């Protein structure tokens, strides 16, 4: 009875349930007398559904498992853990020299080893190992100086060897943490930092791709993806809801992109599909699904109803993976044949958390604004380019980028890279506003014209539309006086103490000037004329 509630709220992620005492705070573990196993991360059910939404070639995969555990008749509390498969940004595959190229013709990037021909042996890709180490360092993991490879056996047509090479027993990195910020109230400023433990990071090869043709009742196999290097990041069940899990995944995505270890492009279609399925009275099957980038949706790959026995065994064709630091590096070792963890640590770029702190410190912006700049791909670079070219205050730039610019992008469903307004154009517009050449309302008109007419500069639009700020004080004096004389009722309300009357007068005068008069200057003139 609780499973539908769980799936509706947090569909598409791995869950265990914890009991919440009536009228009290969250309490991990079952109530007294329960026979259920209440240990964190364990489940009393024998079968755990497993759903995987995959995007081919690029990005990452999230493995979702549900562990509904009824511990009380009072309330339920979700405990969320994740397994994330991130495709490593590498020019070649994990154990072969085959190229990695998105949307290549089927079976055009397949080596003898990828096809599992007899006598072929794996050769480990140095780039993939470095990517795993850098990811582990960024997540504060312990880097194992010795890690092992294993064979994970299962049969499917797109896995020609009948097994997958992974690191089940002794992975390359363990015991890390991922910090992320979540909003705990209705206001964006009500943010707190939480941490999820990283159990392990392991190297793993991807399988091929099955293309099911229902019309002809046949399945075609594309092995271009077979053997591509993956990072499997296992997060402990430390999160309490789907929103936390989504925020943690987004933070990991930003870290991987900052490191350059994965492009981490993901379509999160599967969650909405499951919600729609359940709301329409359907059932979520225990299966693996693949993301079809042409259709923009997930499609079934294989069912996982039965308990899997992967028959893990050591990979006999790969020796232990040995890593070194500056102190343990063998003398006379070939730098191309060994990996120095300390050198990789020195190459780590500025991570998203540090970037957000720097933005707050350097530009005085709110923490939620720094989060917004990083969460949109390319938006931080756009913001920094505007800052470099304008004399406007950083707070003014932040407001325009996050409110006006980002708002237009959302309305048109465009990425930052697709914007018709360049950083230089916005910087020029803000300079006009900063030196009071145009009013704030005129600036918005100019921005709209920039959005519609790519190629025109802000100065050209201002000249064509006659949007320059009214600079002649005598003209402004006459307009203000004529407006006051034409609206004696509003003037009377103002003299009676109605604070809204002054705003109405300012609006009437700005309308008469076609928005070219500065509201502050209008207010000063009106107050002076009324007091004389």
Image (cartoon, grey):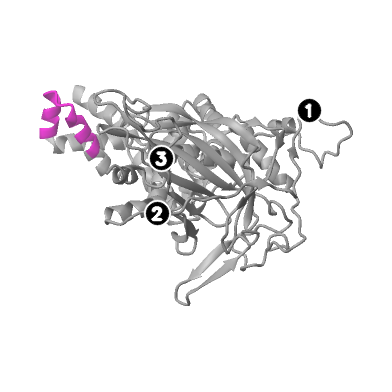
Q: Which residues are magenta?
A: 489-507
- On the image, the x and y values in percent for residue 418 come to 49, 54
The image shows residue 137 at horizontal and vertical percentages of 63, 32
Q: Name the residue rendered at 29%, 36% in the picture.
A: 476
The dot on residue 15 is 3
**Most common secondary structure along the magenta stretch:** helix
In the rendered image, the vertical position of residue 395 relative to residue 163, given as above or below:
above
- Residue 375, x across and y down, in percent: 47, 40
Q: Which mark is residue 412?
A: 2
Lateral position of residue 114 relative to residue 513, left or right = right
Q: Residue at x 43, y 38 (%)?
A: 245
Quadrant assignment for the C terminus: top left
Q: Quadrant of residue 325?
A: top right
Upstream in the sequence, badge 3 or badge 1? 3
Which residue reaches farthest right? 332
Task: Name the residue beneath numbered marker 1.
Answer: 326
């Amino acid at each position: 009875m609780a499973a539908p509630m769980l799936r509706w709220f947090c569909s598409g992620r791995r869950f265990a349930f914890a009991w919440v005492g009536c009228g009290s705070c969250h309490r991990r573990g079952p109530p007294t007398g329960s026979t259920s196993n209440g240990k964190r991360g364990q489940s009393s059910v024998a079968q755990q559904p497993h759903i995987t939404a995959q995007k081919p070639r690029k990005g990452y995969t999230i493995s979702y498992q549900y562990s509904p555990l009824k511990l009380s008749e009072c309330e339920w509390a979700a405990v969320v853990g994740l397994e994330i498969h991130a495709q490593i940004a590498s020019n070649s595959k994990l154990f072969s020299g085959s190229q990695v190229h998105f949307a290549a013709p089927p079976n055009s990037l397949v080596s003898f080893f990828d096809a599992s021909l007899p006598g072929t042996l794996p050769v480990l890709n140095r780039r993939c190992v470095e990517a795993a180490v850098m990811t582990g360092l960024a997540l504060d993991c312990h880097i194992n100086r010795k890690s092992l490879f294993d064979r994970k056996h299962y049969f499917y047509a797109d896995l020609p060897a009948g097994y997958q090479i992974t690191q089940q027993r002794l992975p390359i990195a363990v015991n890390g943490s991922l910090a992320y910020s979540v909003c705990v109230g209705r206001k964006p400023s009500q943010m707190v930092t939480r941490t999820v433990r990283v159990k392990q990071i392991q190297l793993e090869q991807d399988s091929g791709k099955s293309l099911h043709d229902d019309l002809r009742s046949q399945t075609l196999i594309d092995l271009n993806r077979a053997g591509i290097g993956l990072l499997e990041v296992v997060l402990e069940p430390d999160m309490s809801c789907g929103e936390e899990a989504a925020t943690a995944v987004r933070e990991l995505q930003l870290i991987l992109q900052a490191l350059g270890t994965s492009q981490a492009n993901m379509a999160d279609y599967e969650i909405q599909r499951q919600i729609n399925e359940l709301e329409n009275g359907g059932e979520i099957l225990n299966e693996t699904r693949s993301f079809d980038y042409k259709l923009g949706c997930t499609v079934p790959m294989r069912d996982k109803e039965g308990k899997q026995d992967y028959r893990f065994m050591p990979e006999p064709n790969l020796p232990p993976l040995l890593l070194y630091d500056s102190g343990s590096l063998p003398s006379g070792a070939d730098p191309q044949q060994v990996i120095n963890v300390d050198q990789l640590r020195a190459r780590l770029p500025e991570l998203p958390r540090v970037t957000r702190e720097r933005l707050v410190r350097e530009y005085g912006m709110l923490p939620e604004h720094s989060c917004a700049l990083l969460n949109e791909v390319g938006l931080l670079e756009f913001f920094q380019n505007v800052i470099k070219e304008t004399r406007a205050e950083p707070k003014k730039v932040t407001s325009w980028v996050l409110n006006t610019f980002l708002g237009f992008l959302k309305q048109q469903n465009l990425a930052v890279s697709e914007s018709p307004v360049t950083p230089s154009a916005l910087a020029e517009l803000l300079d006009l506003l900063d030196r009071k050449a145009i009013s704030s309302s005129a600036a918005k008109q100019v921005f709209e014209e920039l959005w519609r007419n790519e190629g025109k500069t802000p100065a050209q639009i201002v000249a064509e539309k006659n949007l320059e700020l009214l600079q002649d004080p005598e003209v402004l004096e006459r307009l203000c006086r004529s407006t006051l004389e034409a609206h004696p009722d509003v003037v009377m309300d103002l003299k009676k103490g109605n604070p809204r009357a002054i705003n109405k007068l300012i609006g009437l005068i700005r309308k008469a000037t076609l928005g070219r008069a500065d509201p502050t200057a209008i207010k000063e003139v009106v107050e002076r004329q009324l007091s004389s």
